[in-house]
Amino acid sequence: MSEIQSDLVVAIVGMGPRGLSVLERLLVRLAERAAGPAVSIWVFDPGEHGAGRIWRTDQPDWFLMNTPAGEVSMYSGDPDEGPPRAGAGPSLHEWLSAGHAGPQWSTLGANGYAPRSCYGKYLRDVFHNLVAHKPDNVTIHSVRSSVEHVQRHEDRMRLVTRSGRIVFADKLVLTTGHPRNTPSPWERKMLDHADGRGGLRYIRGDSAADLDLASVGAGERVGILGLGLTFLDVVMALTVGRGGVFEAGPSGEVRYRPSGREPRVYAGSRSGLPMLARGLNQKAPKYRYEAKFLTPGALAEARRRARRETGSAQLDFRRDVLPLLQLEVDHVYYTAMVRDRAGEVAADRFARAHLACAGQKQPDVVEKTLAEFGIAHAVPLDLERTARPFSGQRYADPAEFHRHVLGLLRQDTVEALRGNVHGPVKAALDILRDLRGAVRAAVDFGGLRPRSHREDFLGWFTPINTMVSAGPPALRLAQVRALIEAGVVHLVGPGLRVRPDQGGFLLDSTAVDGAGQVVTTLIDARIPRSSVRQDSSPLTRQLLSDGLICEYINATPRSDDGFATGAVSVTRAPFHAIGSDGRANPNLYVLGIPTENLRWFTQIGNGRPGPLSAFHTDADAIAGDVLARLRTAVAVPAADRFTDDWKFRFDRQPARPGGDHGHR
């Protein structure tokens, strides 16, 4: 029987952006070795390797990214004179400019927003470049199938795919991405209601490209739950995707010309407001805002204070973190105001003065400083009020509410077009993206007390932060306004309530009289939350059942206020999975969305040009740990490495008909 001469076998399950980043950093580190031992890397995904399910390349062009193309890169280094390869390759903008996705996207510009399908093509191209230019001592096996079973086998991991392949790996990295969950009790209620009545449908939340929208009839009354990015995608599919056209009006405003094949859309959410627009990008791709107040030193002092007062270093988000974050927002907001009023030199002077007095908690001096620079009457930027402008309001009818919401959308579009440097509002909100790392330092790995984590951070702050800083380009908001004015989209109002009704599903608002509407199709446009216990994939269920992974519980010592987060429990970098026995498995790593709520904002699907962002450093931490333990492998018979049917080396295996969709 033949021998397999590999000193290290690594498996990556999920070859979307996160898995691709791990592969890239592994190859960077392996290429840095003048000559190294033989390494086999197996990558598994039933979808397109690189793109995965969410970024697959057959999506229509009206599904857009919400990050400018110039700020997106899967390579952990800038391009050089050599071919694109691990550690050196183009950003998405540079790749598009070279015409790789077609001439229609080559002039998009660094500040433009590419279709998701274009990003999928870029990711697929990155994967092929990594494989084509790997070190000679590395073999990459690409498997188009999901992994459905994993178990320990002596000091290794035994993987079984849906297509029947068996692989033994020394190290296993799980980067499985967005889950498909079992129905919640509320979802089951909606499904049962639809099943019991012909002509009704409830469509559970997922990526917009995976929702069954084709069967929605022209003129049908359709309800949409949620007003975030998926809502925008769904609305585009039901309008532009049905032949409707957006046109420029006489004054340059956006207008919508219906095709006649659109349904009538009724949409709402808790806030009642669509996600606010991102400011026109005026920053260089490599720009990073650095925290001035929410610093490691400030957090360390807050933890010392918390330990003195409570016996635990866990923080209270509203007391210990939010004030520092608000100071960051204030600093950028007021500085941009001064810049707009008096120019860059004055803005630099103000920034230094404000940093000194605000950091020393001297409110009287802050007020004097604002007055000195001519902005004494500036209205402070209230994050909650910005995200929840209808709070406490009551509307006599839907028409009154629509007048208010149209005015807000129009004003937000104006603010967005002022930009994220020169426009004070969008400049201040935009830094929340750069401050994610600082926020993570405060909240990740049980950094907050359980109740504050659940209620203050996840329940209150995270939705607000998403609403004001992670929205679409300004054009999308102008298009939503045009759809409302054309009578195609109707916003139900804040405080959305949904319940089964004899004729379908009743959507109503707690704040708008007469808002109730009955729809026959209900589309959930809220992305399913990651929950290890609700994940329906066979692999997750098996890993949990066998105790190879467990749910992270945020708990305060000597207290019964534990919070079941839904996250897979892992160590700090390099993110070893923690089993039900409380021990970290040195051969199993989990990265990305499955760890959400233990870590924050893990749904990011790209790195950035310039200094390595957390997206790439997370992957590099795993790569470094994997390769630090290189050893001379004991020769193992081929049949023990994988089944006899698969003794050959290969680049690609077709997905099985009718399936292999469990993981990405």
Image (spheres, rainbow, N blue to C red):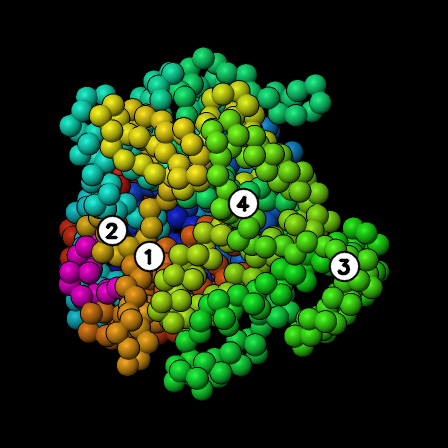
Report if residue 179 is visible in the image.
yes
Residue depicted at 64% across the width and 38% down the height: 411
Residue depicted at 21% across the width and 65% down the height: 548
Above or below: residue 462 compared with residue 309: above
- Mark 2 or mark 1: whose residue is earlier in sequence: 2
Gap between marks 2 and 1 measured at Cα: 9 Å
Gap between marks 2 and 4 measured at Cα: 35 Å
Asked if marks 2 and 1 touch (Cβ < 8 Å), the reply is yes
Q: Secondary structure at mark 3?
A: loop
Q: Which residue is mark 2?
A: 535
* Magenta-colored span: 539-552
Disc on res. 376: 3
> In the picture provided, is 621 more to the left or to the right than 389?
left
Q: Which quarter of the image is occupied by the N terminus? A: bottom left
Label 4 Cα neighbours within 10 Å, binned few <14 / some 14-19 / many ≥20: some
Res 627 → quadrant: bottom left
- Mark 4 or mark 3: whose residue is earlier in sequence: 3
Q: Which residue is mark 4?
A: 389
Residue 103 pos. (x, y %): 60, 29
Asked if marks 2 and 4 touch (Cβ < 8 Å), the reply is no
Residue type, numbered disc 3: Ala
